[in-house]
Amino acid sequence: MSVTFPIQAIKLTPGSQITISNLSWQDFEEILIDLGEKRSSRVAYYRGTLEMMSPLALHERPHRIIGYILTTILDIQGRDWEDFGSTTLKRPPLAGIEPDTCFYIENAQRVQGCTHLDLKHYPPPDLAIEADVTSKITLEAYEAIGVPEVWIYENQQLKIYLLSDQGYTETVNSPTFPELFLTEIIPQWVQKAIDGGTSKMLRELKNELQ
């Protein structure tokens, strides 16, 4: 099937999403070109099905705050990291996805100097963060791409998924931060940031962890 309508004609209101079936990988690539780089919508593609979602502002804040928390912890621990944001991750012809944000941690040094992330030459991100995921296509796409760890923040709860040969399994502890109970503390710190300000929260976090 080829896309016969202008993708720009699809107007998503904040918080809404649309699913399009029976698309080839080429269709997906053409849609990405048509959508352009400067857009607010996120896309996920897996085995012919495309989902487009327009996030609410309430959706945007938590994953950004979680990203700040993550990098603060890594800096305190003296560990390297690289933030690749919502870079489109592709594993043709199976899957493509734009995370809310993603990080290289264990493989941070391997992507230094990278300006165009081609997964034929670089490993997938070590960790992806999503907020308010409502479809299993997201995890299916991440599984096809091979992202080892995915965090999903929804309804003020953090769920951690680890990839194995059997797919993703939910766990209470992150192997990236084995000494921290992130499913407990991250929702608390996110709410502190929302209620009292992100910079203040991060200063408190540093004082608590150092």
Image (cartoon, rainbow, N blue to C red):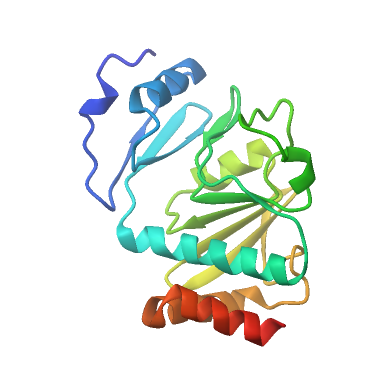
Q: Is residue 16 above or below residue 208?
A: above
Q: Is residue 10 left or right of residue 182?
A: left
Does residue 94 show up? yes
Q: Is residue 127 left or right of residue 27?
A: right
Q: Is residue 33 left or right of residue 189?
A: left
The spot of residue 137 in percent (x, y) is: 50, 42
The spot of residue 104 in percent (x, y) is: 69, 49
Residue positioned 56% across, 75% down in the render: 186
Q: Quadrant of the C terminus?
A: bottom right
Q: Is residue 21 left or right of residue 113?
A: left
Comparing 176 with 197, the one in front is 197
The spot of residue 76 in percent (x, y) is: 72, 72
Residue positioned 75% across, 63% down in the render: 176
Does residue 23 show up? no
The spot of residue 55 in percent (x, y) is: 34, 51
Answer with the quarter of the image where residue 123 lies: top right
Answer with the quarter of the image where residue 124 lies: top right
Q: Quadrant of the N terminus?
A: top left
Q: Is residue 142 above or below residue 114?
A: below
Q: Is residue 105 above or below residue 159?
A: above
Residue positioned 70% across, 65% down in the render: 74
Residue positioned 53% across, 60% down in the render: 152
Comparing 23 with 80, the one in front is 80
